[in-house]
Image (spheres, helix red, strand yellow):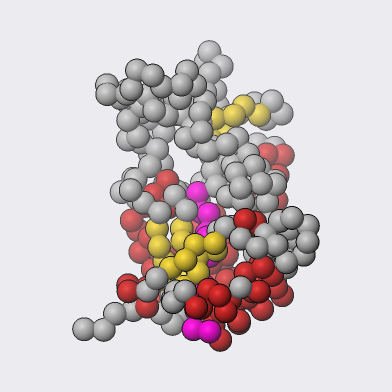
Amino acid sequence: MSYSWWQTGVIYQIYPRSFKDSSGNGVGDLGGIIQELDYLKSLGIDAIWISPFYPSPMKDFGYDVADYCDVDPLFGDLATFDHLLAGAHQRGIKIIIDWVPNHTSDEHPWFIESKSSRDNAKRDWYIWRDPKPDGSPPNNWGSFFGGPAWTFDEKTGQFYMHQFVPGQPELNWRNPKVKAAMFDTLRFWLDRGVDGFRMDVIGLIIKDYALRDNPVNPDAPADLRENDLFGRLLQVYNMDQDDVHPILREIRQLFDGYDDRVAIGELW
């Protein structure tokens, strides 16, 4: 029986800004990875998984993406990435990069448009809802990082959803235009030659259609932080919905149009 490289290979994760600085500004970058490719080869690894290097305000260490198809100047540019990819491939090392499909940065052009008005063409690219009659958030969901999973926008009078920091508004994957745009971001990097993606919190991309309240967790620890709304609830309606599976199959079909690429989901 033959196995694919990703079934038996050793994958080495690199968080760029803490790996090696090649420019002297005190921040690790893609150039630093290039300088150490021979060292990485000597370790016997088969692939490098590179954590996000996209343009980002860094409210969540790069997992708040402001542009899926570019490199933050902090880390280099697209030419540097292409140099890294070519150098790795010359040494028989595959390159896996992070893809953050559940949310963007609040500085992403899509969200800036979506937030501009209720009738903007990209309004439905994110999850906006009216407050309850008493002015409270649309449901009881909590953020992984504390507090509610909703932030109120004074200008348009609605809440937007974020299950992480408020600077990470969640995309509406029930909108076909969002799915098409995000699939295009995969093709951008696959066409450049990347060997696969680690797909961040992929199980969160579809929520309960009615956004029902999550039930209270009867076994929640008594010593939870006061603002830990997430820990007080059972995560029933905000993640791991059956509707995620058809999208995963479409992603696999997209990857199958390329030669031996891997899609790794961050799932529990």
Q: Quadrant of residue 87?
A: bottom right
Q: Quadrant of residue 27?
A: bottom right
Residue at 26% over, 84% down: 2
Q: Nearer the viewer, residue 35 or 189?
A: 35
Q: Is residue 230 left or right of residue 171?
A: left
Q: Nearer the viewer, residue 21 or 132?
A: 21
Q: Quadrant of residue 250?
A: bottom left
Q: Is residue 256 left or right of residue 103?
A: left
Q: Decide whether residue 93 is among the magenta residues.
A: yes
Residue at 44% over, 77% down: 44
The residue range painted magenta reads: 91-102
Q: Nearer the viewer, residue 44 or 245?
A: 44
Above or below, comparing residue 100 to residue 151 in the picture: below
Instruction: Determine if residue 214 is in view.
Output: yes
Residue at 33% over, 22% down: 221
**Image location of residue 268, percent across then percent down:** 33, 48
Task: Give the tally of numbered discs.
Answer: 0
Residue at 42% over, 46% down: 204
Above or below, comparing residue 138 to residue 67 in the picture: above
Q: Which residue sits furthest left?
A: 1
Above or below, comparing residue 27 to residue 185 in the picture: above
Q: Quadrant of the N terminus?
A: bottom left
**Image location of residue 143, percent across then percent down:** 49, 32
Instruction: Determine if residue 194 is in view.
Output: no
**Image location of residue 86, percent across then percent down:** 60, 82
Q: Nearer the viewer, residue 92 or 21?
A: 21
